[in-house]
Image: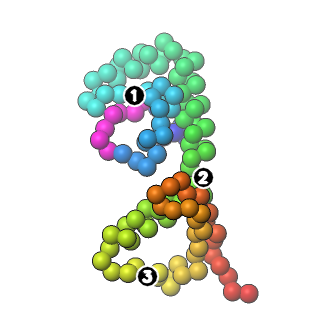
């Protein structure tokens, strides 16, 4: 949705995605109440403030292009699976099909980590 090049009207909800904390109301999206009772009012606001709505769309697209890179998404999944694996009562093992895939990370799971998907390592 952030890539849509349109002002996003986002419902406030208890559900969350990993990037929601980065998004700022009226910078990356126009907030809607949980019950969406204010949708008509917010649509009118967007029409009345066309330049601001266009800027919100532009900000959302810039955020998405910066945040949703292959490296950042690989890092997110790597960190998620590390935390998930730490909670398991057995030691996870790689399937042979994925044994040669590598992600290199710098830092720890608790801090800001830079991860890069290296790709499939090939025997020479």
Looking at marks 3 and 1 on the same chain, the residue that comes earlier in the sequence is marked by 1
Disc ID at residue 93: 3
Looking at marks 2 and 1 on the same chain, the residue that comes earlier in the sequence is marked by 1
Mark 2 surroundings within 10 Å by alpha-carbon count, few (fewer than 14), some (14 through 19), many (20 or more): few
* Secondary structure at numbered mark 1: strand
Cβ–Cβ below 8 Å for labels 3 and 1? no
Mark 3 and mark 1: Cα distance apart in space: 43 Å
Q: Residue at image x 46%, y 57%?
A: 110
Q: Residue at image x 37%, y 70%?
A: 86
Q: Which of 108 and 84 is in front in this view?
A: 108
Mark 2 and mark 3: Cα distance apart in space: 27 Å
In the displayed structure, 113 sits above or below 14; it is: below
Q: Residue at image x 31%, y 21%?
A: 38
- Where residue 85 sits, quadrant-wise, is bottom left
Specify start and end residues of the magenta stretch as a single range.
9-15
**Number of numbered tags placed on the structure image:** 3
Mark 1 surroundings within 10 Å by alpha-carbon count, few (fewer than 14), some (14 through 19), many (20 or more): some
| The stretch drawn in magenta includes residue 14 | yes
Q: Mark 1 points at which residue?
A: 31
In the displayed structure, 66 sits above or below 106; it is: above
Mark 2 and mark 1: Cα distance apart in space: 25 Å
Colouring style: rainbow
Q: Name the residue under label 2.
A: 69
Q: Which mark is nearer the camera, 3 or 1?
A: 3
Q: Which of 116 and 100 is in front in this view?
A: 116
* Secondary structure at numbered mark 3: loop
Q: Would you say 30 lies left or right of 74 here?
A: left
**Residue 23 % position (x, y):** 47, 36
Q: Nearer the viewer, residue 21 or 5?
A: 21
In the displayed structure, 72 sits above or below 91; it is: above
In the displayed structure, 108 sits above or below 45; it is: below
């Amino acid at each position: 949705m952030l890539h849509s090049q349109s002002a996003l009207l986002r419902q406030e909800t208890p559900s969350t995605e990993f990037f929601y904390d980065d998004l700022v109301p009226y910078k990356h999206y126009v907030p809607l109440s949980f019950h969406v009772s204010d949708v008509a009012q917010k649509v009118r606001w967007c029409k009345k403030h066309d330049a601001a709505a266009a800027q919100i769309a532009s900000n959302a697209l810039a955020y998405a292009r910066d945040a949703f890179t292959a490296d950042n998404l690989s890092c997110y999944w790597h960190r998620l699976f590390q935390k998930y694996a730490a909670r398991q009562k057995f030691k996870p093992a790689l399937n042979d099909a994925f044994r040669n895939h590598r992600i290199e990370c710098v830092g720890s799971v608790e801090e800001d980590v830079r991860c890069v998907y290296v790709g499939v390592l090939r025997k020479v």
